[in-house]
């Protein structure tokens, strides 16, 4: 599999339609793991770092993961910024891995629902991602992969603390479970802060579309567990299982209220967003995210019959800067990107 | 002719296509006249005011102006605000006449190219309006009408000062000649103030879409003579004949520059405007004017082939609040107006 194979479409988790997928975009579980025989990355030199990289690549090979249909991208060798940005935009790697230096890389499968980052903050970051609200299925995927790797690699583990990780916030299960929610009605009616205030009180964290430290964009929010120590994996998932359906119900309630009481304002916002996306000759990334969010809301509220929801979902990723540049096979300045983005959107939303 | 006959379309001067009509919307000449045997309106009582009104109506009758195809609207009797606003929106009466009290009215012909206001600031305000840049033709129309009225009515006239008027700024010829210009490119590129600075230096006044004291809206500007005393009618027209073509040339030059050097930004603005007008479910009057202005620019620059310029021109008038309310045959609150306006625009711009 070649990276260029990915350009035309997003990962399957974004195209798919899992439970509650009008509001829950995806469910993700990731595990942090480290090799017992090496220090954490904050304390390695370049040689050790490369040794870790090679060991893990070999283990991935033995685990049968670098098979046909999987893709390993060696970020040290690839080394061009565009590739890192491209993988980041697809949620296959983190900003930390993208911006890092030295031996590191990522393995992922064709559907992009499984990925292993090597030498990010920890030696290994394993993630499974599923469309819609399927945290437990994502957890099953990740547990299987973890077992296969465990058979080859000796992970740093303490009977007392559990898995040992570079940052104490990950010690224990090393697990973070998260769901990506699309909450345009709660944002539109300015009720989102109230939701987040209650969520953070029960030790859940709220992050933006591109994870830690990123802005909420396109009304997307990731909700994940804050704590990994002294809490079982089941408990983490249980917490999301209790909280997420309540947020989903709240968002639905506000949507229904808008449809009943403020229909013209809602229709106006939705139709203008679609009209602008179909008409613009130049559009930046932020405006695109916001307008696509309104269109997505419109489709899910039954206001826009002719728009395909998976087209809208994919456009969130495919209109990002590195995607447009890979599409055009060259670097584009900001003006060129905005014109290319507008043209790309028009082609995909031409009803 | 009934006022309801007017609802579906604007006056002919706006639909027509005179010289330079891509930039010069219309040319207008108006004369201020007063009856010699009555005081100015600032010094009349209600009875005298009514007497003036009756005398002039009778003269208009004798002049053969209240014939089939003409319309006289008695604003005292009509007395509902919506009718006044409706006539104001069509540029048939001034704000002063609309907001006035007591015996007053307006006569106009089917094409709306001739109109006589009775008991505005002066006893009579006669206007002729033509599509495009045709000040001299408008002047011929008005001169003919003035002669016919002069044959029946004795106007206040002094050998030394010329026609006497309620406000000294109109004494002399009593004439104001003006052209309505559409200057979106000069506004877009922020060069409009420079133009106006030079125009006002040579004793021309710049006003908005609805005349004295109104905001520039939709990038429309009226340019007219400031002085009526000690200057012949020919000189007033000569001044406009010299200045207007230079402004027109400047606007064209900037349009061509934009098309050559900043085409994507221009196209983006034009297409977004059209897209928004075609999509909105609620839109206020000001936004409508601004977007229509961009669409009008787009049509005249050859960027929007499928849009009819006279449709765009008419929408500037037909989307005004009183027009929408006459269309719906009832008063509408602001929210209803904005929704009605959006629907009306969509129907007319559905390509």
Image (tube, coloured by chain):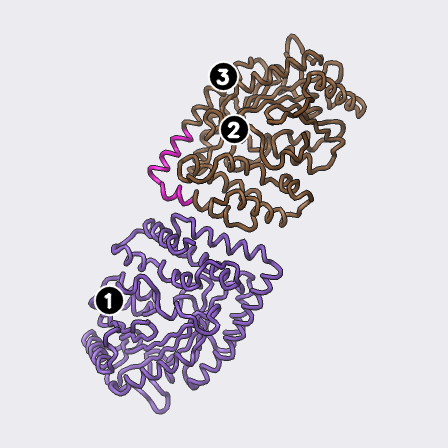
Chain colours: A purple, B brown
Give the mark nearest the N terminus, 2 or 3.
2
Question: Residue A328: x and y, percent?
Answer: 27, 54
Q: Secondary structure at mark 3?
A: helix
Q: Nearer the viewer, mark 2 or mark 1?
A: 2
Residue annotated with mark 1: A2
Instruction: Give the quarter of the figure containing the C terminus of chain A.
Output: bottom left
Question: Residue A4: x and y, percent?
Answer: 26, 63
- Within the image, what quadrant is residue A107 found in? bottom left
Label 1: how many residues lie within 10 Å, few (<14), some (14-19) or many (20+)? few
Residue lying farthest to the bottom in this orientation:
A159
Residue lying farthest to the right in this orientation:
B47
Residue annotated with mark 2: B16
Dots 2, 3 in contact, CB < 8 A: no
B33 inside magenta stretch: no
Label 3: how many residues lie within 10 Å, few (<14), some (14-19) or many (20+)? few
Residue annotated with mark 3: B238
- Give the magenta range: B250-268
**Foreground of the two, B28 or B141:** B141
Q: Secondary structure at mark 2?
A: loop
Q: Secondary structure at mark 1?
A: loop
Label 2: how many residues lie within 10 Å, few (<14), some (14-19) or many (20+)? some
Label 1: chain? A
Q: Is B18 on the left or on the right of B211, as rendered? A: left
Q: Nearer the viewer, mark 3 or mark 1?
A: 1
């Amino acid at each position: 599999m070649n990276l260029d194979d990915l350009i035309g479409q997003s990962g399957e988790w974004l195209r798919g339609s899992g439970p509650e997928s009008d509001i829950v975009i995806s469910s993700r579980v990731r595990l942090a793991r480290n090799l017992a025989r090496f220090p954490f990355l904050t304390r390695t030199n370049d040689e050790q770092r490369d040794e870790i990289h090679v060991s893990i690549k070999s283990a991935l090979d033995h685990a049968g993961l670098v098979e046909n249909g999987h893709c390993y991208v060696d970020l040290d060798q690839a080394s061009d910024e565009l590739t890192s940005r491209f993988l980041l935009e697809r949620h296959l790697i983190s900003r930390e891995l993208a911006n890092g230096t030295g031996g590191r890389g990522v393995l992922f499968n064709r559907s992009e629902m499984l990925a292993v980052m090597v030498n990010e903050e920890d030696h290994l970051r394993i993630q499974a991602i599923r469309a819609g609200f399927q945290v437990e299925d994502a957890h099953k995927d990740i547990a299987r992969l973890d077992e296969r790797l465990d058979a080859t690699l000796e992970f740093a583990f303490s009977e007392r603390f559990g898995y040992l990780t570079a940052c104490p916030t990950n010690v224990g299960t090393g697990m973070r479970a998260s769901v990506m929610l699309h909450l345009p009605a709660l944002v539109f009616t300015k009720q989102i802060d109230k939701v987040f205030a209650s969520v953070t009180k029960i030790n859940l964290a709220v992050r933006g579309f591109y994870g830690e430290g990123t802005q909420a964009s396109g009304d997307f929010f990731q909700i994940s567990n804050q704590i990994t120590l002294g809490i079982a994996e089941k408990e983490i998932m249980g917490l999301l299982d209790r909280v997420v359906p309540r947020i989903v119900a709240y968002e639905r309630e506000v949507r229904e209220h808008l449809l009943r009481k403020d229909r013209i304002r809602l229709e106006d916002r939705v139709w203008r967003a679609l009209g602008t996306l179909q008409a613009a000759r130049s559009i930046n990334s932020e405006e695109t995210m916001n307008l696509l969010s309104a269109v997505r809301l419109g489709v899910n509220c039954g206001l826009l019959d002719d728009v395909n929801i998976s087209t809208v979902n994919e456009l969130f990723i495919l209109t990002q800067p590195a995607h447009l540049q890979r599409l055009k096979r060259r670097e584009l300045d900001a003006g060129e990107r905005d014109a290319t983005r507008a043209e790309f959107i028009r082609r995909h939303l031409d009803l």
